[in-house]
Image (cartoon, rainbow, N blue to C red):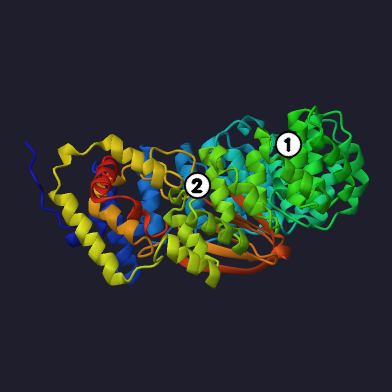
């Protein structure tokens, strides 16, 4: 039977604390290390403590006990260079690896030890040791970091390792901004192909000479597809970049490449640089219903991203072609045209569920479109059920007296007082706790969840991430959900705060910032990711508010709320 033991290691001597590093119960060794650290900090350790731990770290037959000796030495600041050199030659890979980890923790490694690291990066046979050396690249002087990157990149056996290529890249990537030429040169010699891909991608991110150099490599490459893929990925989301001279020399051949993928990516890159020479051909392809669909889709993306004025009518005219309907809906919000609202509203009955969501998103981003939407709801040509709490919040963000007046007629108050919020939480919590839950169906609650919540929240680890993953949250109970749904702004995680972007042509978009560069901001909305050029932005406002709007439960009666809560608490 289990017999509890009363232990007080505070009363143990220094020698006993050292011996506890050999105890079969890891709690004793961990607690003893903490106490040794505290005594060392106060200057109360006996003189022979360090010697005993050094002997354990270097001579004990069990590698796990040598590790404990090493950790305890680090805890009392006793890992001296002479001892470290011995440990870096230990027969056990984990002892060697942990010595590297502990030495680089304070970023102050002696020159002789850095030299030993370089020898190990060349010759050590252990991938574990090489992984720890890769992690040290960012914690040693740049000169040593570059050499570690170079030597580690020459281990061909690591090219398929799950961690090493990325860890080496994390290290050398932190150095690359100051010396992109060296990174490019290192990638050319590397035996790990992924490093070359990372360098080419980051060169595009850095732009300037780094990008020019990569375009030079692209011009010489026999197989251009992998390299141009990396460049296009690096430039993704950018807008209105100054066209490099190196691109001018190269682009014509790429646009005419027999490799369709290369030609496609070249046009996307050309659009980032505002190369209008490609637009006439793009318009011709897009207008030709007999042209391959993939070719027309590329043309639509390029022309829409550039908002080419000569292409606008053509782009909008494709709204009834199934492959382009969603693209036109999303484009409509970017176009400051009075006919866009009518174009969407008259097709409401024919849109799919996803298209309806995108259309409502577009109609709430401009004052003129919002007024048309609210008028349509008021005269009942559009069903009020399409207007959710999320859309009501988006309309209120427009800060338009005309929109606010019409919204109050079809929706009511957008914001409630704190007292009303607390009262509603208490009321529904009481109703749920007293309800005979056996009489309520989880399947009905799931239907309510799908209608109200599934746009942003997906249980069971799906790929949508507008809201937190709800898997396992059911154990928090019904009140947890009521508090978060009814008062979503009470506690807001920084990852889910709203940013509002107002553009110079009258559009207002809200969402979560995914990426921000000198030329563009990418904003995640409930339907897609929107990229806005910095040159088009009038104002950016960050709000300490949740992406989840208040008022989500307004469309449900008490029975339906219980059904929803029963489903949520089952997750």
Q: Is residue 114 above or below residue 159?
A: below
Q: Nearer the viewer, residue 132 or 552?
A: 552
Label 2 with label 1: CB-CB less than 8 Å: no
**Label 1 Cα crowd, 10 Å radius (few <14 / some 14-19 / many 20+):** some
Label of residue 49 in the image: none
Residue at 48% of width from left, 47% of height from top?
A: 465
Q: Whole-percent x and y of residue 348?
A: 55, 43
Residue at 74% of width from left, 30% of height from top?
A: 293
In this rendering, the label closer to the viewer, 2 or 1 = 1
Label of residue 86 in the image: 2
Count numbered badges in the picture. Answer: 2
The residue tagged with tag 1: helix, strand or loop? helix
Question: Going by the picture, which residue comes out furthest to the front?
Answer: 379
Can residue 451 be seen here? The reply is yes
Residue at 31% of width from left, 46% of height from top?
A: 473
Residue 276 lies left or right of residue 344; in this view the side is: right
Q: Whole-percent x and y of residue 178?
A: 73, 59
The residue to which callout 1 is attached is 297
Q: Quadrant of residue 186?
A: top right
Q: Is residue 179 above or below residue 23?
A: below
How far apart marks 2 and 1 lie (CA) works out to 63 Å
Q: Quadrant of residue 143?
A: bottom right
Q: Whole-percent x and y of residue 503?
A: 66, 65
Location of the N terminus by quadrant is top left
The residue tagged with tag 2: helix, strand or loop? helix
Q: Nearer the viewer, residue 98 or 516?
A: 516
Q: Whole-percent x and y of residue 434?
A: 13, 50
Of labels 2 and 1, earlier in sequence is: 2
Residue 277 lies left or right of residue 264; in this view the side is: right
Q: Nearer the viewer, residue 346 or 387?
A: 346
């Amino acid at each position: 039977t289990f017999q509890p033991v009363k232990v007080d290691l505070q009363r143990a001597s220094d020698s006993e604390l050292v011996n506890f590093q050999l105890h079969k119960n890891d709690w004793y060794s961990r607690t003893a290390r903490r106490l040794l650290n505290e005594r060392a900090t106060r200057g109360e350790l006996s003189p022979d403590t360090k010697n005993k731990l050094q002997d354990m770290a270097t001579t004990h037959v069990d590698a796990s006990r040598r590790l404990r000796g090493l950790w305890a030495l680090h805890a009392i600041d006793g890992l001296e260079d002479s001892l470290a050199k011995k440990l870096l030659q230990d027969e056990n890979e984990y002892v060697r690896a942990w010595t590297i980890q502990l030495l680089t923790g304070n970023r102050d490694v002696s020159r002789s030890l850095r030299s030993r690291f370089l020898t190990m990066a060349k010759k050590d046979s252990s991938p574990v040791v090489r992984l720890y050396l890769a992690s040290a690249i960012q914690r040693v002087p740049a000169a040593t970091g570059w050499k570690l990157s170079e030597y580690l990149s020459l281990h061909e056996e690591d090219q398929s390792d799950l961690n090493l290529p990325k860890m080496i890249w994390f290290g050398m990537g932190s150095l690359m901004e100051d010396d992109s030429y060296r990174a490019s040169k290192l990638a050319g010699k590397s035996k790990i192909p992924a490093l070359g891909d990372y360098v080419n991608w980051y060169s595009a991110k850095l732009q300037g000479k780094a990008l020019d150099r990569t375009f030079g490599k692209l011009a010489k490459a026999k197989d251009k597809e992998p390299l141009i893929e990396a460049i296009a990925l690096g430039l993704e989301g950018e807008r209105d970049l100054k066209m490099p001279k190196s691109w001018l020399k190269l682009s014509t051949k790429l646009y005419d490449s027999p490799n369709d993928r290369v030609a496609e990516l070249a046009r996307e890159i050309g659009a980032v640089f505002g190369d209008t020479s490609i637009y006439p051909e793009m318009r011709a392809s897009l207008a030709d219903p007999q042209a391959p669909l993939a070719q027309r889709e590329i043309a639509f993306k390029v022309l829409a991203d550039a908002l080419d004025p000569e292409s606008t009518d053509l782009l909008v005219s494709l709204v009834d072609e199934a492959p382009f309907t969603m693209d036109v809906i999303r484009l409509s919000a970017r176009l400051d045209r009075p006919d866009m609202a009518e174009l969407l509203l008259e097709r409401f009955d024919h849109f799919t569920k996803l298209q309806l969501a995108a259309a409502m998103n577009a109609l709430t981003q401009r004052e003129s479109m919002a007024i048309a939407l609210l008028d349509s709801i008021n005269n009942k040509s559009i069903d009020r059920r399409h207007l959710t709490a999320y859309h009501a919040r988006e309309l209120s963000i427009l800060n338009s007296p005309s929109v606010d007046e019409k919204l109050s007629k079809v929706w009511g108050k957008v914001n409630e007082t704190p007292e009303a919020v607390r009262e509603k939480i208490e009321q529904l919590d009481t109703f749920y706790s007293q309800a005979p839950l056996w009489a309520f169906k989880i399947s009905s609650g799931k239907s309510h969840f799908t209608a109200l919540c599934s746009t942003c929240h997906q249980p069971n680890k799906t790929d949508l991430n507008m809201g937190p993953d709800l898997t396992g949250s059911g154990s928090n109970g019904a009140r947890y959900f009521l508090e978060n749904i009814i008062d979503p702004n009470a506690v807001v995680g920084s990852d889910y705060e709203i940013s509002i972007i107002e553009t110079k042509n009258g559009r207002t978009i809200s969402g979560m910032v995914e990426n921000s560069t000198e030329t563009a901001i990418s904003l995640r909305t409930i339907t897609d990711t929107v990229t806005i050029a910095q040159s088009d932005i009038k104002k950016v406002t960050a709000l300490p508010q949740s992406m989840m709007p208040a008022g989500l439960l307004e469309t449900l009666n008490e029975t339906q709320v219980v059904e929803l809560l029963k489903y949520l608490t089952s997750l």
